[in-house]
């Protein structure tokens, strides 16, 4: 029996499932906030006005705010109030929505909604695999981390190398990598539940953090799938 299954002893499966449902509800709320803010900012041209006032500094500010939320949420997770953790997560979702308001300027509505639907199918499939498999996916953690580093390096290199910028290889690799990370994160969320007993403020905060991790997984899958869809549309 794997280490993961050993950790699960003594826990009622219905309680574990209820906890996972809670995590998905929180993740869904984050996606809803992102979509709502993106739509509002798109129809009001908020990004245009923001950028005309702040210029390039505005983009740096948004990135800094997102990093600040990630650092704050991860470093104080076990001690902060659950309401604060919720607020930080939703703040990140709102900032992402503000940035995503530009997607409909860069891509067609068909590509955006098609990519979202396809990403949802892929994400849910891998989430189910991660929550039901008996294989300990932490064995692949080094591979996932190495893949992330390689993906970041390739993405930066694509800014200076036209052949990489026009290649879909990075997008396909990104989709595959984050699908694997999604399954791994699902297993990690269950492990966090087992470690804290599933109840209390710490368990609630871990549920928020788990939702945040899955939210990031989905967002990355969506962005890479969108690039693939958009490229396919351009070729037709």
Image (cartoon, grey):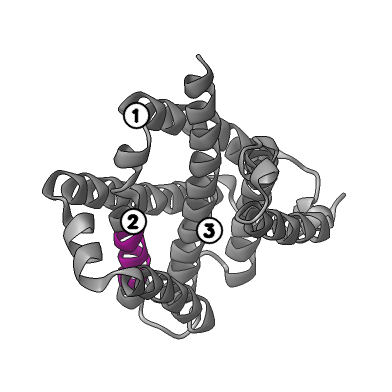
Query: How many C-alpha atoms fall within 10 Å of the one at disc 3: few (<14), some, or many (≥20)?
Result: some
Residue drawn at (53%, 48%), measured in percent from left and top? 220
Residue toward you, 95 or 166 = 166
Extreme right residue here?
1
Residue drawn at (45%, 81%), measured in percent from left and top? 72
Image position, residue 206 (x, y; %): 50, 67
Is residue 47 toward the left or the right of residue 7 in the image? left
Q: Which residue is mark 3?
A: 213
Is residue 37 toward the left or the right of residue 169 in the image? left
Among the two numbered marks 3 and 1 on one chain, the one whose residue lies closer to the N terminus: 1
Q: Nearer the viewer, mark 3 or mark 1?
A: 1
Label 1 secondary element? loop
- Residue contact at pointers 3 and 1, CB within 8 angstroms: no
Q: Which residues are magenta?
A: 86-96
Q: Is residue 107 magenta?
A: no
Among the two numbered marks 3 and 2 on one chain, the one whose residue lies closer to the N terminus: 2
Image position, residue 126 (x, y; %): 62, 37
- Residue contact at pointers 1 and 2, CB within 8 angstroms: no
Label 3 secondary element? helix
- Residue contact at pointers 3 and 2, CB within 8 angstroms: no
Is residue 74 toward the left or the right of residue 2 in the image? left
Residue 54's disc is: none
Q: Which residue is mark 2?
A: 99
Residue toward you, 9 or 145 = 145
Is residue 92 toward the left or the right of residue 124 in the image? left
Q: Which residue is mark 1?
A: 108
Label 2 secondary element? helix
* Location of residue 228 with respect to 144 vertically, above or below: above
Is residue 114 at all visible to an observer of this figure?
A: yes
Query: Residue 91 sits in which quadrant?
Result: bottom left
* Location of residue 228 with respect to 50 vertically, above or below: above
Tell me the CA gap for discs 3 and 2: 19 Å
């Amino acid at each position: 029996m794997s280490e993961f299954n050993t950790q699960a002893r003594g826990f009622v499966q219905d309680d574990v499932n209820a906890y996972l449902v809670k995590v998905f509800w929180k993740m869904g709320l984050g996606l809803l906030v992102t979509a709502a803010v993106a739509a509002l900012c798109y129809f009001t041209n908020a990004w245009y006005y923001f950028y005309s006032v702040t210029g390039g500094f505005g983009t740096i500010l948004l990135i800094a705010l997102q990093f600040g939320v990630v650092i704050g949420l991860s470093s104080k997770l076990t001690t902060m109030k659950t309401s604060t953790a919720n607020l930080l997560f939703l703040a990140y979702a709102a900032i992402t929505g503000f940035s995503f308001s530009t997607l409909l300027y860069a891509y067609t509505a068909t590509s955006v909604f098609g990519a979202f639907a396809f990403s949802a199918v892929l994400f849910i499939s891998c989430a189910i695999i991660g929550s039901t498999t008996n294989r300990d996916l932490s064995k692949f953690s080094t591979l996932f981390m190495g893949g992330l580093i390689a993906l970041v390096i390739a993405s930066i290199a694509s800014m200076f190398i036209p052949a990489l910028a026009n290649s879909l290889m990075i997008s396909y690799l990104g989709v595959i990598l984050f699908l694997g990370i999604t399954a791994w994160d699902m297993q990690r969320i269950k492990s966090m539940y087992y470690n804290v007993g599933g109840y209390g403020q710490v368990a609630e905060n871990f549920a928020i953090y788990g939702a945040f991790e899955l939210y990031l997984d989905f967002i990355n899958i969506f962005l890479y799938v969108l690039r693939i869809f958009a490229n396919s549309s351009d070729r037709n």
